Amino acid sequence: MTTMAQVICGLARRWCFGALGSPLQVPCLQALPLHLGRTATRASQRDLENAVHQVKLWKKDPGNEVKLKLYALYKQATEGPCNLPKPDMMDLVNKAKWDAWSALGSLPKETARENYVDLVSSLSAASEPPSPAKPAADGEQAGGDLVVTSENHITTITFNRPAKKNAITTKMYQDIMLALQAASKDDSVLTVLTGNGEYYCSGNDLTNFTDIPPGGPEEKARTNAILLREFVDCFIDFPKPLVAVVNGPAVGISVTLLGLFDLVYASDRATFHTPFGPLGLSPEGCSSYTFPKMMGPSKAAEMLIFGRKLTAQEACAQGLVTEVFPDSTFQKEVWTRLRAYTKLPPNAVRTSREVMRSKGRERLHAVNAEECGALQQRWLSEECTSAVVRFLSRRGKL
Ligand SMILES: CCCCC/C=C/C(=O)SCCNC(=O)CCNC(=O)[C@H](O)C(C)(C)COP(=O)(O)OP(=O)(O)OC[C@H]1O[C@@H](n2cnc3c(N)ncnc32)[C@H](O)[C@@H]1OP(=O)(O)O
């Protein structure tokens, strides 16, 4: 019997999106004949199993909402109503799963089974057989704003908003956290962040600031600070080697976070820019600590206070980048190297990393908390508000 944990883990692999993943391995299901076009009005157990198999063939990530719906219906169909204790609110994935399942109340098992099969049937019509995910060309929007693939023991999280230079939306912060949580438990040895298209990432999506809740800007600044702190904490605590494949220019938080990565490979087209001064902001991603440590206080000040943009070669000379590759051979050389690294004994890799990281972790959490506190104030400042308004109005967004 296939458990839902296995199904979800299968989804995570197939859709390349680990948000609802589980630490369990998925043994490949036997090839099952498909009965999705069933004629009977009630779905049988066999129909359910076939639908589960069909889901594993989906190429496109149907999004968290659908995945949660499928999870909930499957649990209801196989176990009945949810009677598990409510997970802690910080346990994002399990809380979302629990909420979805509990919302089905006392829906009968047979109805849940039927709903699951119908939902898969309607969504399958639009999906194609699987093929290895590869970054889409600029302008294409394959797989949503974030694409997560897991292949050859490498989990890759790709910023996929090329038309917006891969700026990070609020939802993307949340999805990246979920993807990291899943990657920490999957069978990958390395976790890679990269960008689709011309840019690696243009940092925080500045339109995030326009969505003011009923509690006003103070409330917005408070929730942003919480989100940012949780987001950066996920990188501090991530248990496996983190690799940035910087395919093009990087801005803001996509640069500051690099101080928490183990390897940063950059194309010679990449640049590294933290325009906090012009934006009326202050550093985040623990860069106020990692950058001076890595490049010395004055070079760090030039970047973080005065917003000097570095070329890839300069960033490499400062220790922010591990190695720079010609853009024409960048992808080939980097991925060949990463695949070779996955052949190393995984436990030795993890142990070495842990002994290198464990000493500084507590300090990083304290730095993260301090930076988020400072930013919460900055976001409410006139300097920051005017800078965001300038950016948005220049682009006709106000
Ligand atoms: C809650 C967590 C908070 C975390 C704190 C994080 C802080 C940071 O990350 S600070 C850094 C924020 N980022 C920026 O300041 C960059 C802003 N963008 C730019 O300066 C430029 O867009 C560019 C240099 C990245 C690219 O310039 P250019 O080649 O001229 O392209 P366009 O400006 O025309 O951009 C195309 C398209 O993309 C939109 N866009 C680009 N970056 C962002 C962004 N960060 N936020 C929102 N939108 C962005 C731009 O508006 C254009 O959109 P359309 O006009 O609709 O085509």
Image: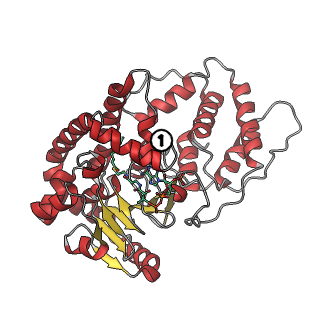
Q: In front: 74, or 178?
A: 178
**In the drawing, does residue 224 fall left or right of residue 335?**
left
Q: Where residue 33 appears, x then y in whole percent?
A: 78, 52
In this picture the colour scheme is: secondary structure
Residue 218 place in picture, x, y as percent:
32, 26
Dot 1 amino acid type: Lys
Few, some or many C-alpha atoms within 10 Å of disc 1 (few <14, some 14-19, many ≥20)?
few
**Callout 1: SS:** helix
Of all residues, the one furthest to the left in this rendering is: 297
Relative to 61, 394 lies left or right:
left
Distance from mark 1 CB to nearest ligand 1 atom below 8 Å: no
Residue 178 appearing in the image: no
Rendered-image quadrant of the N terminus: top right
Camera-side residue: 207 or 137?
207
Residue at 77% in and 42% down: 122
Residue 303 drawn above or below residue 17: below
Q: Residue furthest right?
A: 39
Question: Which residue is more in the foreground, 395 or 39?
Answer: 395
Give residue 197's position: percent from left, percent from top: 51, 66
State the residue position of label 1. Answer: 171
Q: Quadrant of the rendered structure where residue 222 is?
A: top left
User: Along the line of sight, which residue is nearer the eye, 39 or 196?
Assistant: 196
Quarter-of-image position of residue 338 = bottom left
Q: Is residue 114 left or right of residue 304?
A: right
Could you tell me which residue is drawn at 54 percent across and 58 percent down? 163
**In this rendering, does residue 365 appear at all?**
yes
Residue sitting at the far top? 106
Q: What residue is at 19 percent from the left and 54 percent from the top?
A: 305
